Amino acid sequence: MSANFPWMLVLLVTPLAGCGLVAVSRTRTQFNACAAVTAAALLALTLVIIDQVLVAGPTSEVSGLLYVDALSALLILVVSLVGFASLLYSIDYLGRSGSPHEASLPRLRRYYLYVLLFLFTMYLVAEANNLGILWVALEGTTLASALMVRYYQTRRALEASWKYLILCSAGLAFALFGTLLLFLASVRALGLGGSGLDWTTLVAAGSQLDPGLVRLALVFLFIGYGTKAGLAPLHNWLPDAHSEAPTPVSALLSGALLNCAMYALIRVDAITLQIPGFTLTHWLLLGFGLVSVFVAAFFILLQRDLKRLLAYSSVEHMGIIALGLAFGGLLGIFGALYHVLNHAVTKAALFLAGGNLAVAAQTKDLEKIQGTLAAIPVTGTVLLLCGLALAGVPPFSIFASEFIILSAGFAHGDAVAAILLLVALAIVFAGLVGHLAHILLGSASELRFAPGMRKAVGVTLGIGLLASLAVGLGLFLPDPLSQLLHRAAEVVAG
């Protein structure tokens, strides 16, 4: 394996090549084969890139425009894991004859094209060294995913799609202005031209940037990227979009897209950490984080729709990640990045298992679903394990990262915020356990899988991979993954 081979560029080209194959395919079998092969290739390329980062350190390609360090590699891993499971699930959910939401050939072609374009834009977010290109890539994620939110063409889906498109585009307009202000600070300090927005340049020269300009830029960046990350009170688009999109798209939105926007904020945080005495980032992260966890906690108690429940849970966990970054130090940053991975695999697994449940029950109304463990035991078991993991029950993975984040809060002088986080987590725990008890226990409902879903290989592999990680990462953290997380935390902390 050549160290000089352009693996990053190949990773970007692969989903585009998959789009080309889908475009020329003519049969349902060919469409599904293109999706499966592309998903497997992306996951394999991800492992190669992670290995290179761990062995050789950060690398760049295309004259420095593409740059991958441990933090980038972590986001690539998240996107690839969720993308792999979602594409395999899509084959059985939409792609096969007799699927519960069987698509016509033209619609299936469009669906796979949109998903692969969506993956391309998220990989570009991870690999972009230039913050301007990162902004363009995030805008690209909005356009690609909005087309999938409206997939079912119902009135509510169209409304959710437009709401998502308008709110996130307006938010990213704020982020663009913040990016331009950051560029101005760079030019004033360094006199640079085209490289003035390169993240590597900005981090190296962070101490020379004008704190006043950076503060102003930071406000706009947090409003813009915070909207896309689903941080309250900028989260209004999120429950509608996630609940109306096809199930595998909901998994991608919660497990991968939100982390792409949070990744942009983490990159900005790494720049401001280099400015002596700069505290605005800490307070913004702390404020957005606490508001998010409490807003989500009370909405979780009131939810009656399965997918909206999971969507509000995503708001909560984006807030927890923001709080980990706010608590800071290597401990807090490590906990936040560990939580990025844990939440991604757990939430995606729950969305996919919830899709199974919605197919069997023919409804997303939580009041009408009972006895899932008895009626469909495999899906019920996944919902039980991943639901408990999402609620922060030990020894699952989310408990481990939440414990690290809380430890950082108490250790670094943010005890009041840590206590408030504990209160919010207790409310969420009560809400989630109550909902789980209702849908899993009680008198058995008439839950019946549609033909082709009960023994679907893609569904089993996709959910099985994510659920295994959601449970297993709290018990055992493999050494390469531990190294990746520690190095990613060092990248942010500087």
Image (cartoon, rainbow, N blue to C red):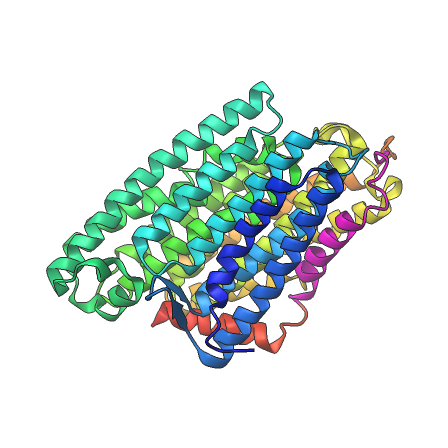
Residue sitting at x 37%, y 35%: 169
The quadrant holding residue 442 is top right
Q: Residue furthest bottom?
A: 55
Looking at the image, is 343 positioned above or below residue 366? Answer: below
- In the image, the segment drawn in magenta is 448-474
Left or right side of 405 for 35? right
Left or right side of 233 for 81? right
Which of the pair 172/393 is nearer the observer?
172
Verify whether residue 394 appears in magenta.
no
Which of the pair 124/464 is nearer the observer?
124
Q: Position of residue 484 (x, y in %)?
A: 51, 72
Looking at the image, is 284 positioned above or below residue 102? Answer: below
The quadrant holding residue 226 is top left
Q: Quadrant of the N terminus?
A: bottom right
Which of the pair 489/331 is nearer the observer?
489
Looking at the image, is 11 positioned above or below residue 217? Answer: below
The quadrant holding residue 125 is bottom left
Q: Is residue 329 visible?
A: no
Q: Position of residue 379 (x, y in %)?
A: 79, 46
Left or right side of 231 for 211? left
Looking at the image, is 368 positioned above or below residue 323? Answer: above
Q: Is residue 91 visible?
A: yes
Q: Quadrant of the C terminus?
A: bottom left
Residue sitting at x 46%, y 51%: 260
Q: Position of residue 233 (x, y in %)?
A: 40, 37
Number of numbered callouts drawn:
0
Residue sitting at x 52%, y 45%: 118
Q: Position of residue 136 (x, y in %)?
A: 36, 46
